[in-house]
Amino acid sequence: MRWIDLAFLHWRVPADDIRALLPPPLEVDLFDGSAWVAVSPFRMTAVRPTFSPPIPTATDFPELNVRTYVRHGGHSGVWFFSLDAASWIAVLGARSAVGLPYFHARMRERRSSDEIQYECTRRHPGARAAEFRARYRPTGAVYRAEPGSLDYWLTERLLALRVAHRTSAACRHRARAVAVATCHGRRGCEHNGRRGRDRAAERRAACAFRTRARRRRALARARLAVFRGRADSKEPFRSRRARRHV
């Protein structure tokens, strides 16, 4: 498989905030005294099981993960809080085979020159709502991160850790070539701000529409029941205006 159009978006976070979210065997990995959280949008390509042909809808799709950096048994690794993907097959396969917290999402990635426009809205049944929208592009030349630097510490990770079965899955790779980039966007686990108000208005409108639709259906069923009752009786059917003059 290959990752393309990848962005590493990082935030410095107090270590205690991350420590409260990790299972007991894992320790927070710190750089310069702080924990770090990353949101990584990208596109997966050339995805297929070993020694098998590509599977339609599961070989090329956008994916987005939210992760932090941990240590376990003397090794550095990553801990995924969530992974959203546009392929249902990939989501179900990863959940059953690896046990990672994959979620299905409606995703769209568009390239305009060297800029990537990325949108992700979680649609997984029973999952907490989450949304991500961003535009990002490179603003510097490609370079190799130097050992000991923050860029090297954030990208040179050899283990993706999971605790369910006390095992770790190795994902070994060479040191990444990176470039400085600029990003504009929003993310969140709950809709807030102006967009949240817009979404709330949309939900109220949809609820009102469904209520009106239910009322119309109930009225139609009542009218049909009345008509059937009259049809079963021997009294001939008469309009409301005709009955008014009887």
Image (spheres, rainbow, N blue to C red):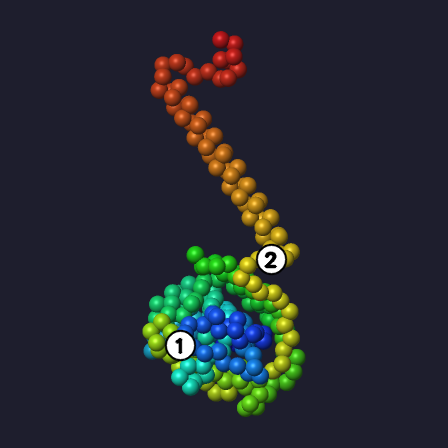
Q: Which residue has dot 2 on it?
A: 192
Callout 1 amino acid: Pro
Give the residue type at disc 2: Asn
Going by the image, does 235 lie left or right of 62? left
Q: Are marks 1 and 2 in contact (CB under 8 Å)?
A: no
Task: Point out the frontmost of discs 1 and 2.
Answer: 1
| Quadrant holding the N terminus | bottom left
* Relative to 182, residue 210 above or below: above
Q: Is residue 134 left or right of residue 173?
A: right
| Residue at (52% x, 73% y) in the render | 16
The extreme bottom residue here reads: 147
Q: Residue at 42%, 86% (x, y): give it.
A: 74
Residue 133: give its label: none
Q: Please give the name of the residue rendered at 58% of the width and 76% of the height, measured from the top-left corner.
A: 12
User: Compared with residue 225, is residue 59 higher up or lower down, i.e. above or below?
Assistant: below
Neighbour tally class for label 1: few under 14, some 14-19, many 20 plus, Cα within 10 Å: few
Q: Where is residue 49 in the image (x, y as percent from the top left)?
A: 36, 75
127, 122: nearer the viewer: 127
- The residue beneath circle 1 is 25
Q: Residue 114: horizontal and vertical position, in percent? A: 63, 75
Instruction: Indicate which disc, 1 or 2, sits on the residue closer to the N terminus.
Output: 1
- Secondary structure, mark 1, is loop
Where disc 2 sits, the SS reads: loop
Q: Where is residue 109 in the image (x, y as percent from the top left)?
A: 55, 67
Query: Residue at coordinates 43% horizontally, 17% vertically from top-left?
Result: 237
Residue 116 on image: x %, y %:
60, 71
